[in-house]
Image (cartoon, rainbow, N blue to C red):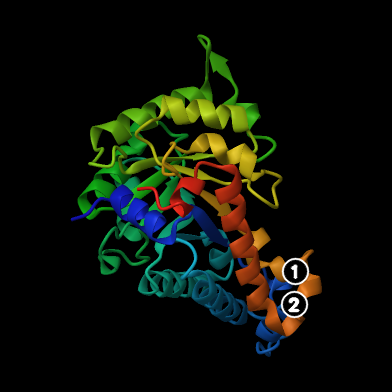
Amino acid sequence: MTSYSERLNAAIREKRTPALVGLDPRWDALPAEVRGRRPDGERGSYSDRAEAFREFCCRIIDVVAPLVPAVKPQAAFFEECGHWGAAALAHVIGHARQAGLIVICDAKRGDIGSTAEAYARAYLAGDKPEAAPWGADALTVNPYLGADTLQPFVSTAVARGAGIYVLVRTSNPGAGHFQDRRTEGEALFECVAQTVEELARGDATGDDFGPVGAVVGATYPEELAALRLQMPHVPLLIPGYGSQGGTAADVAGGFREDGLGAVVNSSRGIIFAYHRAPYEDRFPAKDWERAVEAATHDMIQDLADHTPAGALRRGCP
C-alpha cells in the first residue's frame, strides 16, 4: 500500500504543479445552460440542484484533470440538497478518482470516539476508492474537541493509505478570535500545530511526510512560513488564494525548496471564472469550460512564477 503523501507527491510531480481546484457549486452562479435543464422552478428542487451540481462538477473535473493533481469538493453545498446531494457528492468523488485525481473531501468532521471512527470509515478510502461510501483520498478534520478525537481519523488514514488535513490556521477574517488566544506564551493554533506535527512524524514515510496534514490559510503569510518550519513532516492545504485575497507570493512560504509540501486551493476563482475579468470578456457564456481551463492555466503559471513550485516546472525531482 502506498501512503497518501507519496501518492499526492507523485501526482504533484506528474502534473508539475501544486494547484488544487475546489468544487464549491452554487446554484445562482452555475452556467445558464446547466441550470436551464432543470425544470422545477427558478431555484430548482433539491433533486434538480443536486443533479445540476453533479453535472457541473463532473464537467469541471473533465477540464482540470489533465492539468492539476487534485480537487477538493466542499460537502456542505451537496448536503444542502439532502440525500440527493449526498448521492451527487459520491458520484463527483468517484468521477474525479476515475479521472486519476486525488480527492480531498472538505467536510471538516470532528467528534469523539466511535463517532469519529464512523466519520473516518465513511469518507476515507485511501488508495482503494471502494473502501468507503464517499471514497475520498483525504478529509478535512476539526480538532476543537481535543487531540484524542484526531486519533480515530489517523488510525483509519494509516490503515487505508488515506490522509487528513487538520484545521490549524484558517483563512477566514475571524479566525484569530479563537486561534490567536495565548496560554503560557503559545497561541492556540501553535499548540494545534505541535500536535499535528507529532502525529504526522510518527507515521512519516520515505518522502518525509506523514498522513496528517494541516489547513493553513494564505491570508497569514508570515504565520504560514513559520508553521512550515514548525511542521516539517506535515503536508499543507492552503486556502485563501485568489478570491479570498491571497496571492502566490503569500503562499510561497508553505513549500519546501523542491516545490513539495503544499497544495494551494482556488475554488470560485477557477470554477466560476466565466463570471469575472478577464475571462468573461474573452469567452462567451457557452464557452464557460474554456474560461475554467484558462483560469487554471493562469493559476498554475502564477504559482510557478512566484513560489518554489517553479522547481516542479523545471523538472526538478
- Residue 9: where, in percent of width, then height? 35, 51
* Amino acid on which the number 1 mark rests in the picture: Tyr
Q: Is residue 118 visible?
A: no
**Observer-nearest residue: 205 or 48?**
205
Q: Residue at x 57, y 27 (%)?
A: 223
* Contact between labelled residues 1 and 2, with CB atoms less than 8 Å apart: yes
* 185 up-or-down from 58: above or below: above
Under tag 2, what secondary structure?
loop
* Amino acid on which the number 2 mark rests in the picture: Phe
Residue at the far front: name it. 314
Residue 96 falls in which quadrant of the image? bottom left
Quadrant assignment for the N terminus: bottom left
Q: Residue at x 69, y 47 (%)?
A: 244
Q: Is residue 238 visible?
A: yes
Question: Where is mark 1, residue-wise?
Answer: 279
Dot 2 alpha-carbon crowd within 10 angstroms: few under 14, some 14 to 19, many 20 or more: some
Under tag 1, what secondary structure?
helix
* 65 up-or-down from 154: above or below: below
Marks 2/1: CA–CA distance: 6 Å
Residue 280 falls in which quadrant of the image? bottom right
Q: Residue at x 53, y 29 (%)?
A: 225
Q: Is residue 135 left or right of residue 286?
A: left
Question: Where is mark 2, residue-wise?
Answer: 283
- Residue 317: where, in percent of width, then height? 35, 48
* 107 up-or-down from 240: above or below: below
Q: How many marks can you see?
A: 2
